[in-house]
Amino acid sequence: MTDLFEAEPTSTTSLDMRRLQRRKRRATRRKFTLVATAIGLVVLALGGSVAYNFFASLSSGSAAVEDYEGTGQGTVQVVISSGDTGAQIAQTLYDAGVVASTAAFIQAYNDNPDSASIQAGYYFMHREMSASAAVLQLLDPDYRDLRTITVVEGKTLDTYYQKIADLTDYTKEEVEEAAQDTEALGLPEEADGNLEGWLFPSTYSFNPGVTPTDVLAKMVSTTVDVLERNGVAEENWEEILTVASLVEREARLDKDRPLIAGVIYNRLAIDMPLQLDSTIHYFAPSDSVFTDEDDRAVDNPYNTYLYAGLPPGPIAGPGEASIQAAVSPAENDYLYFVTVNLTTGKTKYAETYEEHLQNVAQLQQWYAKNSDSSD
């Protein structure tokens, strides 16, 4: 019993030490928890601040895109290439000093629904323009730097060559030289190397620096386009252009084109000479609308008084209306026609030679009264 009560008792001092150690451990854990919480709050606050500043900078940046005001000043030429995107156009304008920044132009480009219709070419722009004004100017054809040529129907190569020379600042002789390279012009084999009738009369626009070859090739390709659009088979291209050129030179009014084409086909069908003064004037140009016996006696393959059938090729540049008449002539039994009033273009048709002579007499009467004011 004495041994049981004599065991070493737990001292107050050791108990206090253990309690103190437990308190320290709990305090340490609380301290780490508080520090971790504080750090988390700081990180969260910093993250929110960074995110806010990031989005705020985006917002303020878009509102502060550098841009000029107004329509600018001075003039500078810029070139927009085929297939250029809005960003590429923006860089071109920025490099030329037209816009203050590419970002401003891209924004204006995207805001304008017509921007996609901006065409490739040379443009006159102002320096230091607002981006929106630059977009509008690129959409305005008046600011394009173009070389324009208009060639009318019924003229021959000589006239067209002079027009092209005037447009390109080349000499007429240089244009004629370019015309010899028919392969470079894309002239179809059916033409047999002859450009007559293959230079489609129309209005064309070209960029600065255009060459005679550029113009001639465009006119030839337009002729091909017109023939294809009107359903002409390739093997008939030359024949249709030849008939159309005769119609072009003979018809004064659009309504007469199919009728005259009908007369031509009617004569061809019975192997009757066409007897057209226009073919005489092709190889013997004259200011007179008439021909005489000496003219009609000249031995020339284009003389349709001497030779039946179509002439060797076109005698002028026919327009689309004449091509359409050659494709779809009026169906009739007429073998003759004559314009009886050279002022109004009134034309009469006949099935017999006797009827035709009566119509010719009307022309002679008109001419006797109006010869002073006529051709």
Image (cartoon, grey):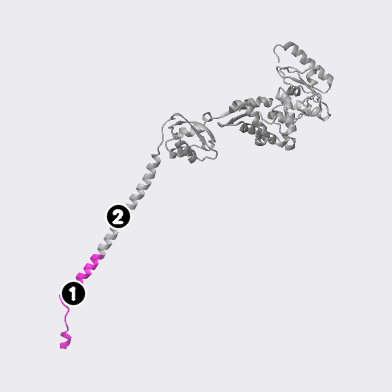
Give SS at disc 1. helix
Q: Amino acid at mark 1?
A: Leu
**Percent from the top left, x then y, of residue 122?**
53, 33
Which residue is more in the foreground, 184 or 208? 184
Q: Determine the secondary structure under disc 2.
A: helix
Which badge, 1 or 2, is on the more N-terminal residue?
Answer: 1
Q: Nearer the viewer, residue 211 or 130?
A: 211
Q: Is residue 189 visible?
A: yes
Q: Is residue 237 left or right of residue 63?
A: right
Residue 10 magenta-highlighted: yes
Quadrant of the frame with the N terminus: bottom left
Point out the stretch of residues depicted in magenta. Answer: 1-28
Q: Is residue 292 left or right of residue 135?
A: right
Q: How far apart are the alpha carbons under marks 1 and 2?
A: 41 Å
Q: Which mark is residue 164?
A: none
Query: What amino acid is at disc 2?
Result: Val
Q: Quadrant of residue 187?
A: top right
Mark 2 surroundings within 10 Å by alpha-carbon count, few (fewer than 14), some (14 through 19), many (20 or more): few
Viewer-nearest residue: 298 or 114: 298
- Let me know if residue 22 is in the magenta part: yes
Q: Quadrant of residue 258?
A: top right
Across and down, in percent, residue 81 comes to: 53, 38
**Residue 202 at least partly seen:** no
Residue pointed to by mark 2: 42
Residue in the foreground of this view, choosing between 226 and 94:
94
What's the mark number on residue 15?
1
Mark 1 vs mark 2: in front: 2
Q: Position of residue 152 (x, y in %)?
A: 65, 25
